[in-house]
Amino acid sequence: MRKETENWIAGSEYDINTAEHMFTTGRYLYVVFMCHLSIEKSIKAIIHEVTVKLPPKSHDLIYLSNLAGIQFPESLLDFIGKVNSASIVTRYPEDIAKAVSAYPKDIAREYFDKTKEVLEWLKQDKRLKG
């Protein structure tokens, strides 16, 4: 595995750990933000490993997944769309109070748990096994 790929994976792990810390401190909006970022970096690890190029500066998980040739199972695909949409609200909130109230503890927990499932699935990608 290439050094740059390992760096994307390390960044992804750092971000999911940050999401866990944000959950512990009640910063639920940022749990969702960090979950998206963690998935994004894992996908970019695959892109880099395949193309040997710097992945595009995009946050769109659908676009990045297509670029990487990732075909998520149906059980994860809906969540990828959901977290992808949430990224815009968490990254650029027009009304911070409204954004915070949209992601209470139980919703943040769902995002966190499902993100961990996505990350485990991505780690099994054979292109990251080299």
Image (cartoon, rainbow, N blue to C red):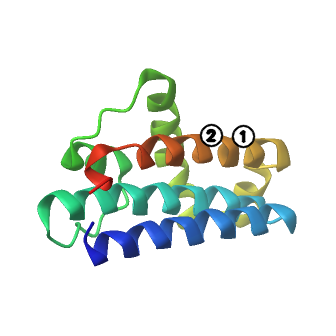
Q: Is residue 78 above or below residue 58?
A: above
User: Regarding mark 1 in the picture, which secondary structure is present there?
Assistant: helix
Considering depth in this image, is 60 or 96 the residue closer to the camera?
Answer: 60
Position of residue 43 measured from the top left corner of the image (x, y, whole percent): 35, 54
* Residue 127 on image: x %, y %: 26, 50
Which quarter of the figure has residue 94?
A: bottom right
Counting the numbered discs, the total is 2
**Residue 24: mark:** none
Residue 124 left/right relative to 16: left
Disc 2 residue type?
Lys
Q: Residues within 10 Å of mark 2 (few under 14, many from 20)?
A: some
Pick the quarter of the image with the C terminus: bottom left
**The N terminus is located in which quarter?**
bottom left
- Please name the residue shown 51% across and 48% down the image: 119
Label 2 belongs to which residue?
114
User: In the figure, is residue 37 to the left or right of 42?
Assistant: right
The residue at the point 80 percent across, 61 percent down is: 23
Residue named by callout 1: 110
Residues 102 and 51: in front is 51
Q: Amino acid at mark 1?
A: Glu
* Residue 15 visible, this orientation: yes
How busy is the neighbourhood of tag 1: few (under 14 within 10 Å), some, or many (20 plus)?
A: few
Which residue is pictured at 67% across the width and 67% down the height? 17
Q: Residue at x 44, y 30 (%)?
A: 77
Give whichever of 2, 20 is nearer the camera. Answer: 2
Farthest top residue?
Answer: 74
Q: Position of residue 71 (x, y in %)?
A: 30, 32
**Figure check: 66 above or below 10:** above
Instruction: State left or right for residue 94 relative to residue 19.
Output: left
The reply to whether callout 2 and callout 1 are in contact (CB within 8 Å) is yes
